[in-house]
Image (tube, rainbow, N blue to C red):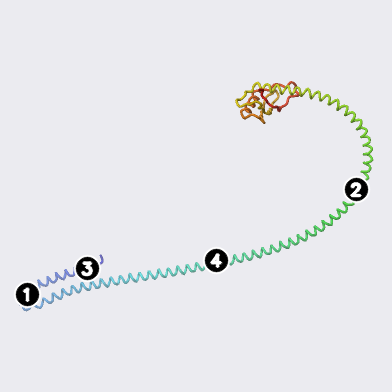
């Protein structure tokens, strides 16, 4: 676009020159018509020179344009160099700033390290001081404990001496008391022996009478108990249903817990010689016997009954 604008004045100038030359030629032709022919010949070189001057002018304009372009390129190159120089200087400044920052950070790190080392040394000194103080305290405590132990041992020996003397006096008093008690005991023993002989004779008589009465009562209660158990076994036998797997001679030990009135609370069938079917049949028969027959006498009632169930063949 810039090059086209630079060519426009040259083209216009050439066009103007062409029109001027044409006008001159008309003028010269008009003059030639009024003058001799010998005068018209020198005018031709003049027109050629003017045409040559137009091309020269265009060449100079092109040179001027090229010079301006070189100047513009040089300015751009100079600007680029200046920009590069500025960027280099800026980068140099940034690097210098970065170095200063790094140096500052290293200095701060070194300072922190020194402070940390100083704090560690102070802590070690403090710990050492504390340790020495603690060792001194422990040494004093050991010394105090040793003195206290020594004093306690002295007091203990003194107390042991006093206790020994007290024990000796107590032993003498005890010996006298034992002698007195021995004499009293001998007297009491003699009295007791005579009383015992009389009491034993009375006890033997009473025991014999009691055994006779108890034997009669036991026989009566046993008979009642046997009748009571037989009544329960008979009721269970009536309610028992023989399973197909039952064999002759099968039996089970039965434990029945009952409440007053014969109401069954728990049934345990143990040590069965038969199989599981036989055991379940016995347990079922016992539960069916609820409530159990009443005892013939309240004295033979027992909350837990033990008996052996042997079904009749």
Label 3 sits on residue: 7
Q: Name the residue under label 4.
A: 109
From what the image shows, is residue 161 above or below residue 43? above
Q: Do the residues labelled 1 and 2 touch (CB within 8 Å)?
A: no
Residues at marks 2 and 4, CA–CA distance in whole angstroms: 87 Å
Give the mark nearer the N terminus: 1 vs 3.
3
Q: Earlier in the sequence, mark 1 or mark 2?
A: 1
Q: What whole-number distance in Å separates the C-alpha atoms at marks 1 and 4?
A: 105 Å
Question: In x, y percent, where is residue 141?
Answer: 75, 60
Front label number (1 vs 3): 3
Lower sequence index among marks 3 and 2: 3
* Among the two numbered marks 2 and 4 on one chain, the one whose residue lies closer to the N terminus: 4
Mark 4 closeness class: few <14, some 14–19, many ≥20 residues within 10 Å:
few
Residue 80 appears in the figure: yes
Tell me the distance, in whole angstroms, between the alpha carbons under discs 1 and 3: 36 Å
State the residue position of label 1.
32
> Residue 70, percent across and down?
29, 72
Asked if residue 290 shows in the view, the reply is no
**Looking at the image, is mark 1 or mark 2 nearer the viewer?**
2
Please tell me which residue lies in front, 304 or 112. 304
Element under disc 3: helix
First reached walking from the N terminus: tag 3 or tag 4: 3
Q: Nearer the viewer, mark 3 or mark 2?
A: 2
Mark 1 residue element: helix
What's the CA distance linking mark 1 and mark 2? 190 Å
């Amino acid at each position: 676009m810039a090059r086209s604008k630079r060519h426009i004045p040259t083209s216009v100038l050439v066009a103007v020159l062409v029109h001027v030359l044409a006008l001159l030629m008309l003028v010269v032709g008009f003059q030639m018509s009024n003058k001799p022919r010998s005068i018209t010949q020198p005018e031709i070189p003049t027109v050629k020179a003017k045409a040559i001057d137009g091309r020269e002018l265009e060449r100079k304009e092109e040179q001027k344009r090229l010079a301006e372009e070189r100047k513009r390129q040089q300015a751009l190159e100079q600007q680029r160099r200046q920009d590069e120089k500025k960027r280099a200087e800026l980068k140099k400044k940034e690097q210098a700033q970065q170095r200063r920052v790094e140096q500052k950070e290293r200095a701060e790190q070194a300072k922190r390290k020194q402070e940390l080392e100083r704090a560690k040394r102070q802590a070690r000194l403090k710990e050492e001081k504390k340790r020495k103080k603690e060792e001194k305290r422990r040494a004093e405590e050991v010394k105090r404990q040793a003195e206290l132990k020594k004093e306690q041992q002295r007091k203990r020996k003194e107390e042991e001496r006093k206790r020994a003397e007290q024990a000796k006096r107590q032993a003498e008093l005890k010996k006298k008391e034992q002698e007195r008690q021995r004499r009293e005991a001998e007297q009491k023993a003699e009295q007791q022996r005579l009383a015992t002989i009389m009491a034993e004779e009375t006890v033997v008589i009473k025991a014999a009478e009691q055994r006779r009465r108890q034997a009669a009562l036991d026989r009566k209660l046993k008979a009642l108990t046997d009748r009571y158990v037989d009544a329960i076994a008979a009721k269970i036998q009536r309610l028992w249903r023989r399973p197909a797997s039952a064999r002759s001679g099968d039996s089970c030990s039965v434990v029945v817990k009952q409440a007053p009135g014969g109401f069954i609370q728990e049934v345990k069938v143990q040590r069965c010689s038969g199989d599981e079917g036989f055991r379940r049949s016995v347990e079922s028969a016992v539960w069916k016997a609820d409530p159990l027959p009443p005892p013939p006498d309240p004295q033979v009632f027992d909350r837990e009954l033990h008996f052996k169930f042997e079904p009749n063949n």
